[in-house]
Image: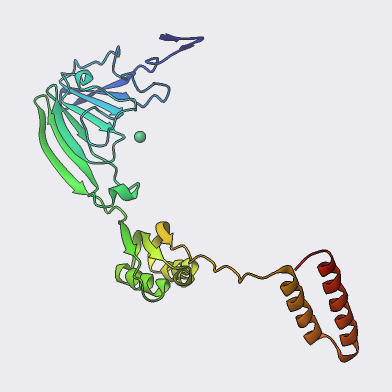
Amino acid sequence: MHAKTGHVTFFHDQTPSSKRLNASQTTVNVTGLSLNPTLTSDQDPLTNVRLPHDAAVNILLTHYPVEGFEGYFGQETHIATSSVPQGYQLFATGHLHHHQKRTVNGTPVIYPGSTERASFQEEHEKKVFVWLELDKTGIIHEEFHQTPARPMETLRHHVASEGSLTRQMQDGLEKRADTEKILRVLVSGKVTLEQLSTYKRSALLSYGQDRFFHLEFDEEGLNVLTQEPLESLPKTTPLQELDRTFRDLLERAREEEKPLVHEAWKLTSNKLQEEGVS
Ligand SMILES: [Mn+2]
């Protein structure tokens, strides 16, 4: 129990659950501690926790990052190296998706890792499950079995300055087609507005529909070149603009209207000149 300002938070109320088994006259103790989401990043889940390890073979299961393992970057509830208990033949843990193994305080700590890829960060990782044989001296046999994890791939497409973007990308997709694969295309480069109009993402998505398990596009790296600044209009005066407008009106007017338009032009022009407009 831990007192915080204003209220009482129970952490470590989560006593680990243990099970004692007998296998060929050997006692086996399996202790598990699942992730407690109420812990803050500086609270070590194994502090003040009684962890039994009085059987011949003792196994501890958790679901936390352990300090020093790949994938733990701090700012997250984790088990400190110094908290990894001694007296266990195996400390099997989850949460980090990358398979890894290290001996800490004499205890073998194993992350079997995820059996599937959960993000593109894992696209180059092999996925495994671990098969272990233990006795009271520790791990006596271990095997890593690769799982048929769904392939993920990132295609970095830097746009070429010539030709249709849709065509360029479709060629890239064709080479990577695999109905089991999740493919993402990171589109980058600089294009003109005109070239951008040749990029039809919806056409590419339907092209990929029966060629990939899933296809997605990310155009964050694609920049559209700004257009040349507009040329300013030639300098004119209000009277010149008035003349231009009436000349147009006169051209479009029917024969019988022409005298009227002419009259209006003359009157407006005179009126403005009287007022000093040039
Ligand atoms: Mn997790």
Identify the residue shown where x is 89% and y is 80%: 263
Name which quarter of the figure residue 255 lies in. bottom right
Identify the residue shown where x is 25% and y is 41%: 98
Image quarter in which the C terminus is found: bottom right
Name which quarter of the figure residue 236 lies in. bottom right
Of residues 176 and 48, the one drawn nearer to the viewer in this rendering: 176
* In the image, residue 80 above or below residue 250: above
Q: Is residue 216 visible?
A: no
Name which quarter of the figure residue 132 lies in. top left
Task: Give the side of residue 230 with respect to residue 3, left or right.
Answer: right
Q: Is residue 190 visible?
A: yes
Identify the residue shown where x is 14% and y is 35%: 133
* In the image, residue 55 above or below residue 197: above
Image quarter in which the N terminus is found: top left
Q: Position of residue 99 (x, y in %)?
A: 22, 41
Of residues 163 and 250, the one drawn nearer to the viewer in this rendering: 250
Q: How is the image coloured?
A: rainbow
Of residues 258 and 144, the one drawn nearer to the viewer in this rendering: 258
Task: Give the side of residue 6 with respect to residue 123, left or right.
Answer: right
Q: Position of residue 155 (x, y in %)?
A: 32, 61
Q: Dividing the image into four equal quarters, which quarter contains ligand 1?
A: top left
Identify the residue shown where x is 81% and y is 84%: 250
| Total labels drawn | 0
Q: Position of residue 182 (x, y in %)?
A: 36, 58
Task: Give the side of residue 136 with respect to residue 273, left or right.
Answer: left
